[in-house]
Every structure is written in C-alpha cells, then in structure tokens.
Amino acid sequence: MAKGTVTPTRMELTRIKRKLLTARRGHKLLKDKRDELMRQFLNLVRENKELREKVEEAIREANRSFALARSGMSDEAVRVAFMTPKQEVTLDVTTRNVMSVEVPVYSYETRTSDGADIFSYGYAFTSGDLDAGVARLQEILPDMLKLAESEKSCQLMAAEIEKTRRRVNALEHVLIPDMEDNIKYITMKLDENERSTQIRLMKVKDMMLEEAHHYKEKAEITD
C-alpha cells in the first residue's frame, strides 16, 4: 500500500495494526504448511523412486519373457492368444486430503478371484515364457497403480508447495513490510500533528498570558 493513499488517523492506525497481526499469523501458518508439505513431498518422492525402480525391473522381466515367447511362436498364435481376455479389472478412484491437497487413491477389483483367469489362452499351443510374462504383469499391477497414485500425488503437492511458497513470499516481502511502513508513517504523522498541536497551544497560552499582562498594566495605569 502506497503511503500517499493512507489516511494518517488513529482509526486507520488501529485498522492496519489488526491487519498486520492477522498477516503475521497467516504467514506463520503458511510457513508451517509449506514445511509440512515439503516433508511429506520428500517422503513421497523417495517412495516414488523405489516404486519406479521396482516396476521398471518387473516390466523388463515381463518383456524378456514375451520376447522369448515370441521367438518360439508365430505371429498368428500370439494374436489368437490375446484375442479374448478372460479376466476383467475395475479401477476405483477416490481421494484423500493431505494438507488441503486432494491426492488420488487408486484401488482395483477383478471380476473373479481365480488366478488362472489371467490366462486367456490354452496351454497346448503357447510358450511357458508367455505365461511367465503375463503372470509377472499381473503381479506388478498393484505396484503400477501405487506408482501412478504416487506420481500424481507428487505433481499435486508440488503445485501446492509452489502456491504456498508464493503466498509466504508475498506476505513476507511485500504485504507485511508495506503494513509496517504504513504504521511507521502514520505514527510519525500523528506525532508531528501532536507536536504541532502542542506548539499551537503553547503559543495561544503565551498570547493569552501576554494579553492578560497588558490588560493588567492598563488597569493599573487607569487606577
């Protein structure tokens, strides 16, 4: 707030002091929120790194199995094997609140609980490596969903951290210093006005005393 737009009155001084108190409290709360968000974000990043390494390794293993299966099967046999899936997966997305950030929570259900339903083909004309690849992908599915949940949570929390950081900086470097400057300005103006008033009162008092003195002298001369 520019000093020129501030009315130097006691009412304005009281109002700005109340705003400054609120701003300082808000600044502390936002700093605490930013620090807690950073702590949880770093924990999430470490978890995300471990999950990513685990998922990538599992996918590499599945791809190796598929490559071995592909080397011993014809293109037509591979296409037929995956033509009609038997198992069905339903994904459910909910959210949970982390420091006012709504992060996703992914869960899934399969149509049946039979583990063999992941294989949509017969075993007579397919390779065992194909079974190993499909089974490895089925095993890693929960971790893949967890990884997706973790990465989305990291994105949302990073955006919230940046927004909170901007608010903290705005309060710390702009709003609070401006209010402190305005308080100093108004206090200085009020002090100047008070001194000016005192000087005027002293002059008026001196003039009244001088006038009373002259009046007394005239009265004595008249007597």
Image (cartoon, rainbow, N blue to C red):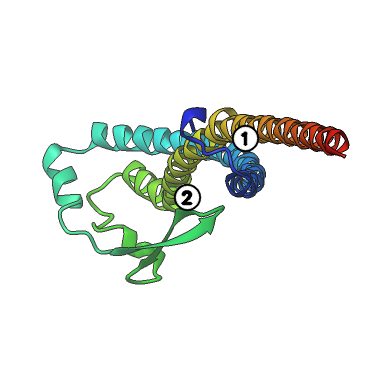
Specify the amino acid type for callout 2. Answer: Lys
SS at mark 1 in the image: helix
SS at mark 2 in the image: helix
Screen quadrant of the C terminus: top right
Q: Position of residue 14 (x, y in %)?
A: 64, 48
User: What residue lies at 14% left-to-right and 38% top-to-bottom?
Assistant: 75
Q: Residue furthest bottom?
A: 112
Specify the amino acid type for callout 1. Answer: Ile
Q: Which mark is on residue 186?
A: 1
- Please indicate whether residue 28 sits to the left or right of residue 202 in the image: left
**Residue marked by disc 2:** 146
User: What residue lies at 14% left-to-right and 50% top-to-bottom?
Assistant: 80
Q: Residue furthest front?
A: 223
Instruction: Identify whether 200 is placed above or below 133.
Output: above
Say which label, 2 or 1, has the lower sequence index: 2
Instruction: Identify whether 41 is placed above or below 195.
Output: below
